[in-house]
């Protein structure tokens, strides 16, 4: 009887141990495998070599206009004329050219005049004894060469490139393709948010808007309200084109650009007030601007969020901090639920 009792105890203890191990495995150690489906990852292809979704390519396939790599795209002409942004790596520069259907060996035909505040700063570095002018005033109030004599050459050089760029910006399509934020193996990409920020930003369109702003103030000071109105309208076009490129991240950047035009006082020179034609041009400038449905922006941001989640689950390193993205707690849960909840959130936004 004693032997049977011990045997029973051992059997019960063994079964209990197995049950504990089973519970630990199911609820602690076991991580359900991600199910690639419209309900979770939204898109099911293309895939990366490691089996993850290639959100970079999926974004291009779903959201790029058909004619972005032709001269219907003003940004393509822009890059061909002015080149790629200077701080892009060589791989990124070649990528942008080839994506736009341009020869990477192409040499820029034009260049923008120097950033106006830099002209003023460099002058005062070379002439420290002179009265310092405030460089920011160049795009805050009307100015003349008498106020800023160091800007005489800038005035002579600015018209050709700024006028050429204005024609490109005003084309109905001004689309900037994504550029990989980092040039690494595709399976270790950090997500689309950085790629969208990189698209076109290398040109720093804020600085380009400042150049139009500077010229507008100069034109107002010399009585050219029609020319100043053209510069204001160009900034509005640039804001619209950046906004139309994609997600709400780009819409925010576009709104910042538009603010550059809002403070330019077209009637800032009492001696030459704007006529009715100039005022009408400003009043109806946005009439023919293309608009992108809000649903499109929601869908783009859906891809951004899903790709960011994928990078976190992978334990991707944040290039800004050198630390891994917060993956530990995420990987202990059901990834299918995480992806599904993001999709459900955006589904609710789209349906409303």
Image (cartoon, helix red, strand yellow):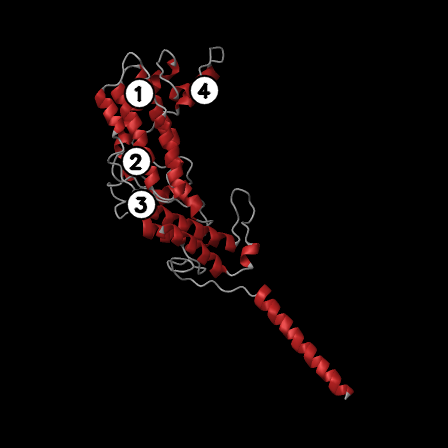
Pointer 3 residue: 293
Q: CA distance from mark 1 to mark 4?
A: 27 Å
Q: Secondary structure at mark 2?
A: helix
Q: CA distance from mark 4 to mark 3?
A: 43 Å
- Picture disc at residue 266: 1
N-terminal label among 4 and 3 = 4
Q: Secondary structure at mark 4?
A: helix
Pointer 4 residue: 121
Q: Is residue 90 visible?
A: no
Q: Nearer the viewer, mark 1 or mark 4?
A: 1
The residue drawn where x is 65% and y is 77% is 15
Residue 132 percent across, percent down from the top left:
46, 14
Dot 2 crowding, Cα within 10 Å, few <14, some 14–19, many 20+: many
Q: CA distance from mark 2 to mark 1?
A: 28 Å
User: Could you say which is closer to the camera, residue 314 or residue 82?
Assistant: 314
The residue drawn where x is 33% and y is 22% is 215
Residue 317 percent across, percent down from the top left:
53, 48
N-terminal label among 1 and 3 = 1
Pointer 2 residue: 78
């Amino acid at each position: 009887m004693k032997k049977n009792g011990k045997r029973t105890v051992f059997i019960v203890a063994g079964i209990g141990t197995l049950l504990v191990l089973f519970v630990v495995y199911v609820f602690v150690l076991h991580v359900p495998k991600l199910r690639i489906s419209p309900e979770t990852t939204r898109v099911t292809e293309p895939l990366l070599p490691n089996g993850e979704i290639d959100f970079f390519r999926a974004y291009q396939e779903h959201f790029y206009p058909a004619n972005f790599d032709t001269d219907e795209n003003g940004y393509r002409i822009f890059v061909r004329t002015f080149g790629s942004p200077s701080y892009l790596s060589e791989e990124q520069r070649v990528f942008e050219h080839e994506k736009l259907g341009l020869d990477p060996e192409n040499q820029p035909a034009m260049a923008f005049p120097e950033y106006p505040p830099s002209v003023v700063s460099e002058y005062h570095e070379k002439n420290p004894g002179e009265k310092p002018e405030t460089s920011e005033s160049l795009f805050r109030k009307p100015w003349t060469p008498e106020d800023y004599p160091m800007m005489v050459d800038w005035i002579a050089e600015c018209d050709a490139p700024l006028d050429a760029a204005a024609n490109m910006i005003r084309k109905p399509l001004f689309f900037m393709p994504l550029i990989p934020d980092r040039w690494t193996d595709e399976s270790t990409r950090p997500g689309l948010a950085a790629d969208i920020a990189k698209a076109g930003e290398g040109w720093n369109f804020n600085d380009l808007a400042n150049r139009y702003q500077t010229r507008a103030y100069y034109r107002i000071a010399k009585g050219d309200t029609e020319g100043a109105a053209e510069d204001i309208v160009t900034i509005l076009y640039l804001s619209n084109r950046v906004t139309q490129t994609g997600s709400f991240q780009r819409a925010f950047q576009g709104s910042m650009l538009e603010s550059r035009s809002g403070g330019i006082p077209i009637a800032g020179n009492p001696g030459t007030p704007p006529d009715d034609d100039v005022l009408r041009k400003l009043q109806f400038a946005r009439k023919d601007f293309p608009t992108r449905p809000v649903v499109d922006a929601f869908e783009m941001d859906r891809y951004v969020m899903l790709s960011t989640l994928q990078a976190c689950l992978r334990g991707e390193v944040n290039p800004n901090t050198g630390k891994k993205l917060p993956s530990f707690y995420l990987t202990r849960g059901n990834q299918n639920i995480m992806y599904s909840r993001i999709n459900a959130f955006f589904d609710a936004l789209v349906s409303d």
